[in-house]
Image (cartoon, helix red, strand yellow):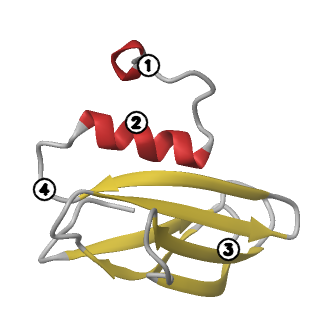
Amino acid sequence: MDEADNEWHNVIAVNKTLNDAKIDVAISVIGQTGTLLKHTFTVPANGRIEVGKIPASPVCALYLLEWRSDSSTGQNHYLAGPRPFNLKQYTRWVLQLGLEVQPPAFMSP
């Protein structure tokens, strides 16, 4: 995903293998129901493809990007919205995703 341009993010998939890859992708917002983008497509070998566009968030949000191919699954995240970001909110989202085992010191009681 790239930075918002004219209120939209371009979603790009890259295939760094020697074979075409059929991929299912879904993008959602942490803490909200529904999906911003859900699509199945084929990325050519050593290629890239624009999967689609999603609207830029008017508020700080964490996008969850999930994908599945015949050979693997994965996920990543993207911090969206106007700056500055709220670091404590971001840390709560990261914990929800299970990306951190221990919260950082500033989150301690």
* Quadrant of the frame with the C terminus: top left
Q: Secondary structure at mark 4?
A: loop
Which residue carries the number 1 mark?
104
Disc 1 versus disc 3: distance between alpha carbons? 41 Å
Q: Residue at x 34, y 79 (%)?
A: 54
Q: Secondary structure at mark 2?
A: helix
Of pointers 3 and 2, the one earlier in the residue sequence: 3
Q: Choose between 80 and 48: the one closer to the eye.
A: 80
Q: Residue at x 58, y 48 (%)?
A: 97
Find residue 14 and report its image quarter: bottom right
**Is there a contact, CB below 8 Å, between mark 1 and mark 2?**
yes
Question: What's the amino acid at mark 1?
Answer: Pro
Which residue carries the number 4 mark?
82
Residue 81 at x, y percent in the picture: 20, 59
Q: Say whether residue 105 is left or right of residue 21.
A: left
Mark 4 is surrounded, within 10 Å at the Cα level, by few (under 14), some (14 to 19) or many (20 or more) other residues, namely: few
Question: What's the amino acid at mark 3?
Answer: Pro
Q: Secondary structure at mark 1?
A: loop
Q: Give residue 44's mark.
A: 3
Disc 4 versus disc 1: distance between alpha carbons? 23 Å
Disc 3 versus disc 2: distance between alpha carbons? 36 Å
* Quadrant of the frame with the N terminus: bottom left
Which residue carries the number 2 mark?
91
Q: Secondary structure at mark 3?
A: loop
Q: Residue at x 51, y 72 (%)?
A: 27
Question: What's the amino acid at mark 4?
Answer: Pro
Disc 4 versus disc 3: distance between alpha carbons? 34 Å
Residue 24 at x, y percent in the picture: 69, 78
Disc 4 versus disc 2: distance between alpha carbons? 17 Å
